[in-house]
Image (cartoon, grey):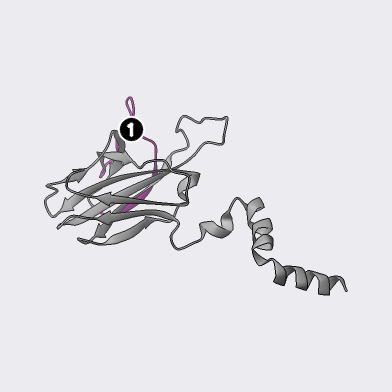
């Protein structure tokens, strides 16, 4: 009898049950969506190489002053007119930064004030922002990273244009 009631309830309100399951998990059910993360769109006539950084947000009412570090990945190639999911991290859980340059000669660079270390070859690293006497380790060099606009969503999309 109880099993019958449960089956009817699940059939009558599947979204309600999905929400009851996902909300306590911190929206983990939706975070696995193929669209979750940061997408960069190359709106230029040039191929662009990108490096992306993701820093988790501090819990409300606390601060680590960025001392936990962030995940930094490079390089991903984005062809002219292409949009590419460059990070699958959930946007609302932290903040994205990106550094991009046209190839082969880097005539246009998208960078910001946040300094992180990159290499000439593909890399995946955990880093802190360069401040004070912090320097890049051998084989890496400093590059400016631009923060994306903070929005309360699981996905962010940035258009790379020559007017940026």
Residue 62 is situated, as x and y percent measured from the top left of the image, at: 56, 30
With respect to residue 47, does 111 lie above or below? above
Does the segment drawn in magenta span residue 128? yes
In terms of secondary structure, where does tag 1 sit?
A: loop
Residue sitting at x 60%, y 50%: 26
Q: Looking at the rendering, in which quadrant would you find the N terminus?
A: bottom right
Residue sticking out furthest to the right: 1
Query: In the rendered image, which quarter is residue 44 located in?
Result: bottom left
Query: Does residue 47 appear left or right of residue 73 in this picture?
Result: left
Query: In the rendered image, which quarter is residue 19 located in?
Result: bottom right
Q: Which residues are magenta?
A: 121-139
Magenta stretch, main secondary structure class: loop
Residue sticking out furthest to the front: 12
Does the segment drawn in magenta span residue 99? no
10 Å neighbourhood of mark 1: few (<14), some, or many (≥20)? some
Residue sticking out furthest to the top: 132
Residue 39 is situated, as x and y percent measured from the top left of the image, at: 35, 55
Residue sitting at x 19%, y 60%: 80
Residue sitting at x 43%, y 39%: 69
Q: Looking at the rendering, in which quadrant would you find the C terminus?
A: top left
Count of numbered marks: 1
Q: Which residue is mark 1?
A: 130
Query: In the rendered image, which quarter is residue 86 located in?
Result: bottom left
Residue 22 is situated, as x and y percent measured from the top left of the image, at: 63, 56
């Amino acid at each position: 009898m109880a099993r019958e009631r449960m089956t009817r309830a699940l059939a009558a309100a599947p979204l309600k049950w999905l929400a009851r399951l996902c909300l306590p998990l911190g929206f983990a059910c939706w975070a696995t969506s193929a669209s979750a993360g940061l997408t960069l769109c190359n709106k230029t006539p040039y191929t662009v190489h990108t490096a992306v950084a993701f820093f988790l947000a501090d819990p409300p009412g606390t601060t680590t002053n960025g001392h936990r570090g962030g995940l930094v990945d490079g390089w991903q190639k984005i062809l002219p007119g292409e949009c590419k999911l460059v990070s699958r991290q959930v946007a609302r859980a932290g903040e994205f930064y990106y550094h991009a340059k046209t190839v082969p000669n880097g005539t246009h660079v998208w960078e910001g004030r946040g300094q992180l270390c990159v290499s000439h070859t593909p890399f995946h690293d955990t880093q802190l922002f360069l401040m004070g006497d912090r320097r890049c380790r051998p084989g890496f060099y400093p590059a400016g990273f631009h923060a994306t606009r903070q929005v309360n969503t699981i996905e962010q999309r940035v258009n790379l244009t020559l007017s940026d």
